[in-house]
Amino acid sequence: MNYALLYPRSNSATGGTANTAAFVSAPTQTRNSDTADGRVDWQIDQKDLIFGRFTYNNVPFTLPGLLPSVTQNGVTVSPGGNVYAFQGTAKDTAQNSQINFVRTISPTVLLQLGFGYTRVNNQSIPLNYGVNASQALGLPGVNLGDQVTSGLTPVFVGSLASLGSGNFIPIIDIDNTFQETGSVTLTRGKHSIKAGAALIRRQATNIQNNFGIGSYTFNPLPHATTQEQLSGLTALLQGNFNNVERSNSLVPPHYRNWEPSVYLQDDYRAASNLTLNLGVRYEILTPFTEVKNALTNFDPTSGKLLVANQNGVNKYGGLDPTYSNLAPRIGFAYTAKPGLVLRGGFGMSYFQGNYTSNGSEKAQPFVSDYRATNPTSGPPTTVFSQGLPVPTPSSATNPTGNVNDVLNKGFRISYLEQFNLTVEKAFGANVFQATYVGELGRHLAQITNDQNAPALISNSALQTLAQQQGITTSAAFNQLRPYHNTLPNAQQIGQFTSTGSSNYHALQLSLTRRATAGLTLGANYTYAHNLDNVLAYSNEVNDGYGVVPSQLSTLEYGNSDLDLRNRLAVTANYALPFGKNLNGFKAALGKGWQANTLLVWNSGVPFTVLEGNGVASTNQAAQTNVRPNQLGKANRSGFNINQFFDTTAFAPQPSGTIGSERRNPLYGPHFRHVDLSLFKSFPVFRESTLEFRAEAFNIINTTNFGQPNNTLNAQQSATNPDAYAFQSSTAGQIQSTSANYVPREVQFALKYQF
């Protein structure tokens, strides 16, 4: 009842009476940004120079809840309204300092030494932080006396706004990076040779719980006698939740790693019209260690969890450093004749692919994972008012529940191969460029929501198996898990592997017209195609990805989430010609004006049509949104906000089978905008000036739409457990604007330069 009372009375009569219609709110977001820079140079003598620099940046942000605060039992509680919106306060504080020493040993030999330090403090703090809100509302076992478990436990109530402080927060990330560098540059004839080394030390602290104060779901329930669907709010009032989960990190990790590197580079002027850039770099990116050895990973061969420095496992949690990170680099510039230049290059670079919470190596025994589900009919086995159990350590040899955020034992360093070829032609005041750009990604991080998923099985086959064994379908599903013999009580195993790949190819065209009669023009067009079998970070539940974990590299290969096929940008700067003959006060006001414009257009970003209900692998599977069968072309001619794509081009497949739709076959609405600005500088005193700016963004007020609803509502047949049909839904409809859309915005600014 106390949770239900967090919902406010309606303040809008739209669609009904004042007590049955919606509650409308538009809370004010606040963001500030402060930056300070400083630099000191000391020329000790003609040969020695020392300079240092310091930069500080602070960006606090406040996102209030959608629902008004409520006071219960003497405690003021913010109900929130969207637990996945990261409502609350956030701050991003970054500071960097560095000191460099440069010594000119001789006219042909230069020594450079440097040290740098960077600290980033990134925090997202939820509503009700530091307030034992759940305890005040009568929910026991949640608020344990520390700030991390303070707040209001999130609940999802049917189609109503969700309540609570938010899932996946608080987030407290504090990163320290120390870097030492040194190089020697030697000039000899046609060669400029540079040899150097660097050492990077990283320290990272991560405090985050996925569901640290629990997360409840209240779905509509069937009436005991009439079987009529009761609302989620009725289920909340009864305390009859559908499921609850709680996941706590018992040992907040403090990561450490080293990154030593050496390199050699030669800029060789082979001829008067040919320059070669030759180089090679070698680096070691060690896997992370943790100061208390709180790292857990997964060995798919043995089916066991690997805990750092336990049972013969190394300090990296079973991972092995990669010592083969050799990166050659080559480039050239060739002037075929005056005004015609050919340039090209190839290079490799290495990076670690587990910079994300899903690859944090936080799992049992350093986390507590609790889950409970009530039956869909009959009395609940557990009710809401009973609260949650206190988090306790779980066994690494026999973990219970889900195992999340582990790396595959074979996880290794990712790398990119990048190459390009450019032809540049100058004619008159114009320069035209045509460039081919390619990039190949290898050993990229792939996330698997459930490495422990059974082979695909139909609903009917699972029901038959459960009946034969006299157990529930859920228990039968768990017994089919591939690691049931070694980890009998483990369910989902979410892990990162490094078997992903990507292929990017692009044609880039550029035309620049240098200032002529006060006019400067520039136009750039890119046609590109990006294919991969990996997902963007924190996008692991999209695209129907990972239904068959063993076939990620083949089934999931398709248009990348970042595949932007076409992009055009045109810029123009024009020094307005009027007022050239004015003098004195009139000249100060009338001449020296400059007009600028920017036009941007790009084609839409890709998306996948999904179906709910876990059709591909029964409704027991972790991946409930999967790809259906695609029967034909789904693109529609023209633009229709109510039916952006043809929903009849898709049909549900029988349960236990994979849909024929490939990943990201469709593309969303185009994006375009035109900006215009007007500048004028006024002389003030000596070299100082005051610049006036009038700037209009999206001056023609073009609306840019977001992606259409891409989820089809698949309902199971009442007579055939393996058959599904799509029900009426809003799939194909566009119901929002693009996240990058800004309505016409006009601003004025003054800038003083001295």
Image: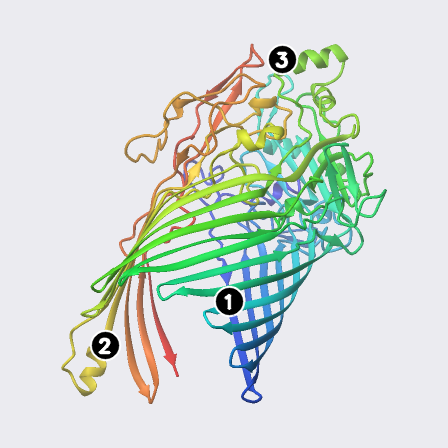
* CB within 8 Å, label 3 to label 2: no
Q: Secondary structure at mark 3?
A: helix
Task: Indicate the amino acid at tag 3.
Answer: Ser
Q: Is residue 475 visible?
A: yes
Cα distance between the residues tagged 3 and 2: 79 Å
Give the residue drawn at x 55%, y 82%: 106
Say which residue label 2 marks: 592
Which of marks 2 and 3 precedes in the sequence?
Answer: 3
Q: Residue at x 49, y 37 (%)?
A: 20
- Checking the image for residue 99, the label placed there is none
Quadrant of residue 457 within the rendered picture = top right
Q: Nearer the viewer, residue 473 or 337?
A: 337
From where the camera sits, is residue 743 visible? no
Percent position of residue 392, x then y: 81, 43
Report which residue position mark 1 lands on.
33
Residue indicated by mark 3? 460
Q: Is residue 729 left or right of residue 691?
A: right
Amino acid residing under circle 1: Ser
- Color style of the picture: rainbow
Mark toward the start of the polypeptide (2 vs 1)? 1
